[in-house]
Amino acid sequence: MTYPSGPGSARVVYYNYPTSGVGGALSRLDNVAADGDGTTKYAQYTYLGASTMVKVAHPAVTNGLNLTYGTGRPAGDESFVQRLEKLLARRLLPGEPGRPRRKKATK
């Protein structure tokens, strides 16, 4: 991608993808750099599993700068909800876990 940098010059930023491994197979962004080889990186991405980004490192920043994301619990973790319901002694989700709630017919 080319950004305008002022009169008569432009700044080119490269989005680099791995050529092998899981990242290559899934076409996940590996880094954003000043060159196509990724020698001068602006951002380096770390993933957990197939698609969850957990860290963005900025090695070009003096002393480094890292942004980390908590992995948390996966959406729809029914065992967690069930344990919480038992602890609170009440239902948190309507109906059975994993099934949509049916509306009752009115007469």
Image (cartoon, rainbow, N blue to C red):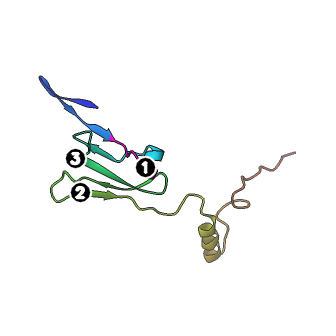
Quarter-of-image position of residue 99: bottom right
Which element type, helix, strand or loop, lies under badge 2?
A: loop
Of the pair 55 and 80, the residue shown nearer to us: 55
Task: Name the residue at 25% across, 30% down.
Answer: 2
Q: Position of residue 50 (x, y in %)?
A: 49, 53
Q: Distance between the residues labelled 2 and 1?
A: 23 Å
Q: Where is mark 2, residue-wise?
A: 65
Q: In this view, does 80 lie above or below 26?
A: below
Find residue 23 and name its label.
Answer: 1
Local crowd size for mark 3, using a 10 Å CA cut-off: few (<14), some (14–19), many (≥20): few
Q: Upstream in the sequence, badge 1 or badge 3?
A: 1
The residue range painted magenta reads 16-23
Which element type, helix, strand or loop, lies under badge 1?
A: helix
Q: Distance between the residues labelled 2 and 3?
A: 17 Å
Q: In the rendered structure, does residue 21 fall within the stretch colored magenta?
A: yes
Q: Position of residue 42 (x, y in %)?
A: 24, 47
Q: Where is residue 90 in the image (x, y as percent from the top left)?
A: 66, 71
Q: How far apart are marks 1 and 3 (CA)?
A: 18 Å
Q: Upstream in the sequence, badge 2 or badge 3?
A: 3
Q: In the rendered structure, does residue 60 fall within the stretch colored magenta?
A: no
Q: Which amino acid does label 3 sit on?
A: Thr
Q: What residue type is labelled 2?
A: Leu
Quarter-of-image position of residue 75: bottom right
Q: What residue type is labelled 1?
A: Gly
